[in-house]
Image (tube, rainbow, N blue to C red):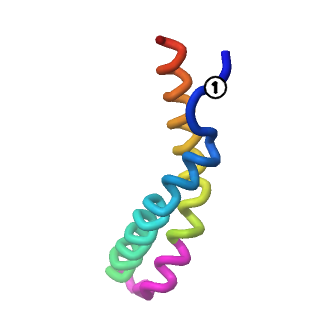
Amino acid sequence: MTRKGWPVWKIFLALYPFGAGAFAVNVFFLSLIWSWVGGPVLSTGWSLVGGFILAVPATWWFSGHIRKLMDEADAKT
């Protein structure tokens, strides 16, 4: 059976901007919660950097998961 559709790296490139944005927001909100116990609130720039870094492995994993679901759907047809 040959694989139909996009490879994992193309799915990753398509989803990375969304993952990076979501992680940047989550990093910022985590720093707000952390400030309740005396931690610093991260600036927008540091939140973006953290989001861009954390999104790489998470988006790669999610892209692999999507590719696996696509293969399962193709196998059922």
23 or 21, nearer to the observer: 21
**Could you say which quadrant of the image residue 64 lies in?**
top right
Q: Residue at x 34, y 74 (%)?
A: 33
Task: Examine the structure image and report whether residue 63 is included in the region drawn in magenta.
Answer: no
Q: Is residue 12 above or below residue 25?
A: above
65 or 41, nearer to the observer: 65
SS at badge 1: loop
Where in the figure is residue 19, as x and y percent of width and height?
47, 59
Task: Examine the structure image and report whether residue 48 is included in the region drawn in magenta.
Answer: yes
Q: Is residue 22 above or below residue 72?
A: below
Q: Residue at x 44, y 71 (%)?
A: 24
Quadrant where the image shows the N terminus: top right
Q: Which residue is mark 1?
A: 3
Amino acid type of the residue that numbered disc 1 sits on in the rendered structure:
Arg
Q: Is residue 36 above or below residue 75?
A: below
Mark 1 residue crowding within 10 angstroms, few (<14) / some (14–19) / many (20+): few
Q: Residue at x 60, y 48 (%)?
A: 10
Q: Residue at x 59, y 68 (%)?
A: 53
Q: Specify whether 59 is left or right of 22.
A: right
Where in the figure is residue 75, as x and y percent of width and height?
54, 14
Segment tinted magenta in the rendering: 37-50
